[in-house]
Amino acid sequence: MEITATKGQIIKGKPVADQISETLIKEVNELVKEGINPKLAILRVGANGSDLAYERGALKRCESTGIQTQVVELPEDVTQEEYVKTLKGLNEDTNINGILCFRPLPKQLDEEAIKYIIAPEKDVDSFSPINSAKVMEGDKTGFPPCTPTAVVEILKHYNVALSGSKVAVLGRSMVVGKPAAMLLLNENATVTICHSRTKDLAKVTSEADVLVAAVGRAKMVKEDFVKEGAVVIDVGINVDEEGKLCGDVDTDAVLDKVSMITPVPAGVGSVTTSILAKHVVKACKLQNNK
């Protein structure tokens, strides 16, 4: 694996996001010249703090790249019938190219049924099983989840050689772990998916050239989890005992051992809204045969 980084380089998400945005601005301008205006609809239930924070970032990113937006907020006690009716309305609205449904949904809503209703061609964050299947198949017309895609974009931006490299993904959720593993496999990496039942977990992860931590446990990844000179992508967003935001990796403990590591905050999270915007433009192009 060819990594030219110095020891303990903190690799931030902003340069990656900015580069993606630069390309998107040009693409959107070209579409607008032809009378095509890419548009994202955000469907949100209630006013969850983390949803609102992500929404603000998404709206700001879309505005800066010229993508139109529409936020549809439904009450916390919305019925299944009302939610489905609203989602179908967005599916049928020809002015809308991408739909982002905030999840998890409240308990009264059946996510298993709703995920089959969102139009796959507008599903820019891989809610639909059709897009999940496309990730598995390596079908480029699909929309992988934004966070795992951000992981791959960061690795590529910082010239981390993935082909033939050993990658360990710590976490097996459908939100990050599994799709991240598939996307990395599509880059010809040799991928091991690790989880809470993995025997000798630290030994397995410490053999990887690249470690993607997406387990949702504050500072779980210590020095013994990491190979000398490895690249570590920390997807976790947790709050430590002092009430500060932190990742799944104990950054201070591993900094002298790794070649590169993403910080939390200002790492993977800062790239996800750019990926969302990228997916909206991609959806718009596909829908307009561009």
Image (tube, rainbow, N blue to C red):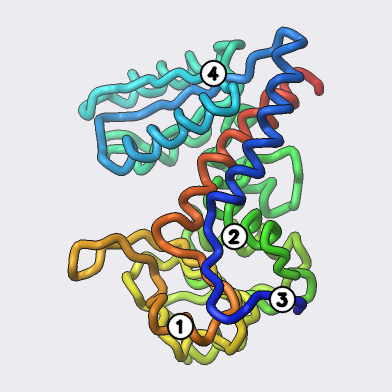
Q: Residue at x 46, y 75 (%)?
A: 195
Type of residue at label 3? Ile
Residue at numbered disc 2: 180
Q: In which quadrant of the rendered image does the C terminus lie?
A: top right
Q: Is residue 282 left or right of residue 96?
A: right
Residue at numbered disc 1: 254
**Which label sits on residue 3?**
3
User: Considering only order in the chain, which callout, 4 or 1, is on the residue closer to the N terminus?
Assistant: 4
- Residue 144 percent across, percent down from the top left: 62, 46
* Front residue (pair 6, 243): 6
* Within-10-Å neighbours for mark 3: few <14, some 14–19, many 20+: some
User: Gap between marks 1 and 2, in whole Å?
Assistant: 22 Å
User: Gap between marks 2 and 3, in whole Å?
Assistant: 21 Å
Residue at numbered disc 4: 68
Type of residue at label 1? Val
Which-is-in-front pick, marks 2 and 3? 3
* Within-10-Å neighbours for mark 2: few <14, some 14–19, many 20+: many
